[in-house]
Image: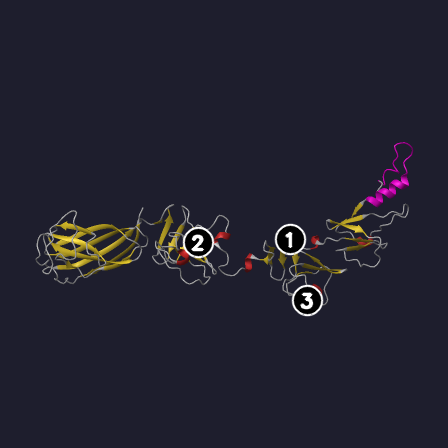
Amino acid sequence: MDNVFILPLPWTGRTNRQGLRAALISRVIYPIADDEDPEAFVALDTESGAVPIGLARHGVIFWLDEDDEITAHDDLTCIVTDDGYRYKVADIQHLFRSVLDKDTTSPPGSPSIGDRYLVPSAATGAWSGHGDEVAVYTARGWRFVEPLEGWQLLVEDENLVYIFDADGEWVSESTRAASSVKASHILGGRTHWVVVNAATNTPPTLTGSGVAYIIGGSPTGAWSGHTGKIAVDEGASWGIYTPAEGWTADDQAQNGAFRYSGSAWLPRNGASLTHKYVKTDANAADAGLDTGTAYSYSDTVAPVTSNAINYDPVGLAFAAQQPDAKLRIKYHARTNITSSIVALWRDNESSAIEWRLVSNGNTVDVEFVVPAPDDSEHQYKIGILRSGSADAAGIIARRLLQIEEFSPT
């Protein structure tokens, strides 16, 4: 194809002014401003017989179609000039940043030029087979545009913005179902949680409620192997999230706040995790001492259940919140024993897990610190022995048994 400017602009000789004029007009993209009427534009230059090859309007180029004599003017896809030339655009993406509706399934009966719809998958009539596309009504009928990943459209009747995502679906964050936004969707992750319990081992039934738990020390099922992690009910499955140092949680069961140290969940308000106690003013039953063997105090050999022991009936059932937590167990009682041995038993174990030789006159005040074996419930009880004798222990009254749990670190 020859350059139309070469002949009217020779290196030597006179410029062909008429040819240059025709070349300039025919090869120019003539701009028509938004406030100008394109139908008033006269395309033909009667002196040279040339017409512009294109018109610039709405930020796009309308190209001359010399063979078209019938398409109506709509200023969207076709411009018809005052002298009947038709300029058309094929790409109509510039026509829309919003649509009127996304739920209309059949083309409206009397659409206006420029009306736009997001076509649903079950559309009928002229829209059939164009699900998820944008339909624009023009003087040339309905024109359709296939969306690209990342497109955004305002749906005007909902006043919501929809995004065409990587799964090929139009989605709006504003219309997602409750609890459907997972923690993994959040940039930077979620760092604070409200948990139902900080030591649950068995996964409850999934309901999609979005509730969270800190997994205990002996997890089962879908939580197996995830001790100390956050489990979130995400409907179809449990979302399991590994805590990072600085994460925090509020435990609804204990009404306590925790912070993750990098290796364990620690209480935020002091070292104590939880506390439980039982007390009574009544005298303990004086029984058992005359049926067992005497125990002679030893720093290394624990009392056993076959020794003469007066068990205090105010035992306490306690479940630690964390495995390997430390338990501080305090016992106070009024007694007429001047020298005795106080021992701590757990469940039905045959040997005491801790013991002390006390000489407190008319009172017994003793404290034990022992590790929690796990986060299951165990029964703790106190037994009193007379040092070196199998005689009765005497009076035990106004007893108080307290258990306080501390984090293992």
Query: Circle 3 is placed at which residue position?
Result: 124
Q: Which mark is residue 33?
A: none
The first of marks 3 and 2 along the sequence is: 3
Q: Which residues are magenta?
A: 3-27
How far, Cα to Cα, is label 2 from label 1?
33 Å
Q: Position of residue 95 (x, y in %)?
A: 70, 55
- Kindly check if marks 3 and 2 are in contact, taking CB atoms under 8 A apart as contact: no
> 39 or 320: which is nearer to us?
320
Q: Residue at 72% across / 54% down in the picture? A: 92
The first of marks 2 and 1 along the sequence is: 1
- Is residue 133 visible from the viewing direction of this image? yes
Amino acid type at image mark 3:
Thr
Magenta span includes 11: yes
Does 140 sit left or right of 329 as displayed? Answer: right
Q: Position of residue 11 (x, y in %)?
A: 88, 32
The N terminus lies in which quarter of the figure? top right
Could you tell me which secondary element the residue under label 3 belongs to?
loop
Query: Circle 1 is placed at which residue position?
Result: 148
How far, Cα to Cα, is label 3 from label 2?
44 Å
Q: Residue at 90% across / 39% down in the picture? A: 17
Q: Position of residue 74 (x, y in %)?
A: 77, 58
Q: Quadrant of residue 287?
A: bottom left
